[in-house]
Structure formats: C-alpha cells, structure tokens
Image: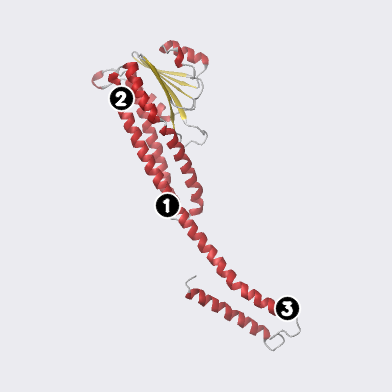
Amino acid sequence: MIERYAQKNRTWLDVVNPTSEEIREIMTEASIPTDFINDLTVMIPHNEVQYRKGTLKITLDFPIVRRTDINHPHEVKFIVTKTHLVTIRFEEIEALHRFAKEFEILCVLKNGKQASTVSLFITMLNFMYDAMYIKLDYLETKLKDVEEEIFNEHEKEMVFELSQISRRLIAFKQTIAAHENALVRLRTGLGVAFGKAHEHHVDLLEHHYRHLTRQIFTLNHTLNDLRETNYALLSTKQNETMKIFTILAFITFPLTLFTSLFGMNTVTTPIIGQEGDFWIILSVMVIVTIFFFVYFKYKRWI
C-alpha cells in the first residue's frame, strides 16, 4: 500500500508491506537506482546505509516496548532523492502517523522557504527518536510502579514484572546500539549524496542517540537496584518463614519423641498406670514447650 503526501514539488511516499509492482512504481516515480531496490520487499537483519550522488538509502531498526504482538523491532527503510522521501515499513508505526498529520506544516520552513527532502528526512528521524524517548518514559513509569509494589510486600509477583522490563530494556539497548555506526555512515552519505552542507543535520541525531544511551544506562542501573532490593526482601521473607518452620520442628520433635516413648507397649513404662498419669505427661510436655519458647526468646530467634 502506498500513501502519497505531496507539497509543491516535494513528495513523501509511505509504503507498507510493498509488493514488487509497488516497488517498480516508486522506483520509476522517485528515480531510484536499481541497486537500491533489491531488499525493499523483505526485512533485513542489520542496519544499512547506501548512497550515491543525488540518492541516499538507510535502513534502521526502532525498538518496540508496549506491543506484545510483535517480537522484532520496527524496521524502516528510508530513501531520499532530490524530489522524494520514501519510507518502507512492515507494521504500523505511531511516529510516522504523527509525521503524516503534520506533513504540510513541516514542508514549510521559517520565512516561507520550502523544506528540502533532506530536511524532511531529518525531521522524520527526529520524530522517530522522540518516540523512543516516550518508550523509555513508559519503562521508567513501569519501574516506579514496580518499586511501589515491592515495598507493598508484593515481592514475589514483582520477580516476573522485573524480568519482563529487563527483557524489554535489553532489546531496546541492542536495537539502539546499531544506530551508532549507521549515523556515522549517514553523515558521510549525506555529504556524498547532497553536498557537505547537509552533514551538520546528523549532529542533532547524534545528540539524540547519546541522550538515549545515557537514559538507557540510568534505567538499567535502576532496574538492577530494584532487582537486588526485591531479591533481598524476598530472601529475608523466605528466611523468616524457614526460621519459623525450623523452630516449630525443633519444638515438636522432642514432644513427638516424648509421646512415642510413652506410647510403647511395654510392661514397665514409668508413670503409666499411676493416678493422674495423663495429666503428669501433659504437664511435662507443656513445661518442655514453655522452656523451648523462653529459650528461643532469650536467643532472640523469635
């Protein structure tokens, strides 16, 4: 499916799950070199940058945080020519929807100057990076919720939640890490394709990248601290439970042994047969229980 957004002689072609016929159509319309279209109908497992005079192509992956129906990053292929900006993707992406709504405004710069396709491309990438900030904010909110639940004595339930957040953060970090080399090549590609004057556009994208990596590091540090805190509280609670069961076992074992001794079918069992023998045995058991209880309190085990 091809969506066209045109403003004067600048056109953005947004293509979702392209067919071979659609690729040939946009190739003709945007004058895309044939060696740039060999992978446009499939996803590739790495970021890639290609360029020649007048044309730039870059493939970037963008992390997914909230969605659970997709187990891979969003892949977007950007192709920039002098007259066209082409995006090829395989899922719905919110940042591109927002860009489409603001396309007409973004096509005009200050003083009524028309934006070049390169400027529109850089603005689109900024939209994509802004969306990643929102995703990290979502993970930060999730961590705050987990922190609150941990100190509300829900440590066991939070083990799974922390694992899920950790999984998302690891995937985010792995996806964004590949952008570093891609941005370096993008700077070179813009210079070759559209002139050295366009290389400075990458500065803001690199700033976004550095800020994202710092935020990822901070969230990862917070996640590790929460995991250690949760583990410590969970271990403490489990140790307390085990201590109680150990004390109960230590108290009941001699009492069980005591009753077993007097339950043996022997002829000369002491006390058995005397007047009030039941109450004597019961009293001894109560005294032993009280003794153990006092002893444990003295040792501060309970």
Q: Amino acid at mark 1?
A: Glu
Q: Which mark is residue 201?
A: 2
Q: CA distance from mark 2 to mark 1?
A: 42 Å
Instruction: Tell me whether the residue at label 3 lies in contact with that at label 2, contact meaning CB atoms closer than 8 angstroms.
Output: no
Q: Which mark is residue 47?
A: none
- The mark nearer the N terminus, 2 or 1, is 1
- Residue 10 shown left or right of residue 24 in the figure: left
Residue 258 position (above or below residue 232): below
Q: Where does residue 52 sit, x and y in percent of width and height?
A: 38, 15
Q: Where does residue 217 sit, x and y in percent of width and height?
A: 38, 42
**Within-10-Å neighbours for mark 1: few <14, some 14–19, many 20+:** few
Report the coloring of the rendering.
secondary structure
**Residue 55 sits in which quadrant?**
top left
| Residue receiving disc 1 | 148
Name the residue rendered at 57%, 81% in the picture: 287
Q: Which mark is residue 264?
A: 3
Q: Amino acid at mark 2?
A: His
Furthest residue in direction bottom, as rendered = 275
**Within-10-Å neighbours for mark 2: few <14, some 14–19, many 20+:** some
Q: CA distance from mark 1 to mark 3?
A: 57 Å
Q: Which residue occupies the foreground of this view, 44 or 15? A: 44
Furthest residue in direction left, as rendered = 111
Q: Nearer the viewer, mark 2 or mark 1?
A: 2
Name the residue rendered at 42%, 52% in the picture: 148
Q: Where does residue 167 sit, x and y in percent of width and height?
A: 48, 41
Q: Amino acid at mark 3?
A: Met
